[in-house]
Amino acid sequence: MNRRPPPFATFQSLLALSEQMADLACAQEWDQLVQLEGERAKLSAQLPAQLPDLPRAEAQSIAELIKRILECNASIQGHVKPWMEHVSVLLAAFSPKA
């Protein structure tokens, strides 16, 4: 039997990974960031498509975890986007001209 962890525990783990990823993005540790993104994607896939009815306090706690995960994502994007733009310029400089 393949049991899934409770949603709250999964969201806690997702937040921990997201916080680590935000730190890695800040430090420009791109390879490690990509590795953790893969782990986070696997963990996210374990969540049900729709959460079951939960006690109000647990639902509020999960909502807070999701909010913090989204804040981490915004921080990550704030570091990744400029790097991607820089890399794009470098790649364009080395691309053959038509």
Image (cartoon, rainbow, N blue to C red):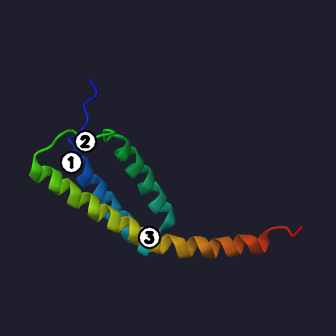
Q: Alpha carbon of mark 3 to alpha carbon of mark 2: how far?
A: 30 Å
Q: 6 left or right of 83?
A: left
Q: What is the x, y in percent for residue 54?
A: 15, 43
Residue under numbered circle 2: 51
- Please state the horizontal and vertical placement of residue 92, each as a whole percent of the image: 74, 71
Q: Nearer the viewer, residue 58 or 17?
A: 58
Q: In which quadrant of the rendered view does residue 60 lie? A: bottom left
- Work out whether residue 51 can be spotted: yes
Q: Is there CB contact under 8 Å for labels 1 and 3?
A: no
For label 1, the crowd category at 10 Å Cα-Cα, with few meaning under 14, some 14 to 19 and many 20 or more, is: few
Residue in view at x 46 percent, y 55 percent: 35
Residue at (78, 71) in percent of width and height = 94
Query: From what the image shows, is residue 85 above or below residue 8?
Result: below
Please name the residue that numbered disc 3 is placed on. Answer: 25
Provide the residue designation for mark 1.
Answer: 9
- Identify which amino acid the numbered label 1 is placed on: Ala
Q: Mark 3 falls on what kind of element?
A: helix
Nearer the viewer's eye, disc 3 or disc 2? 2
Q: Nearer the viewer, residue 19 or 60?
A: 60
Q: Residue at x 28, y 58 (%)?
A: 66
Q: Position of residue 52 (x, y in %)?
A: 21, 38
Q: Is residue 49 above or below residue 82?
A: above
Q: Quadrant of residue 64?
A: bottom left
Q: Could you tell me how many numbered marks the image carries?
A: 3
Q: Which mark is residue 30?
A: none
Crowding near the residue tagged with mark 3, few <14, some 14–19, many ≥20 C-alpha atoms within 10 Å: many
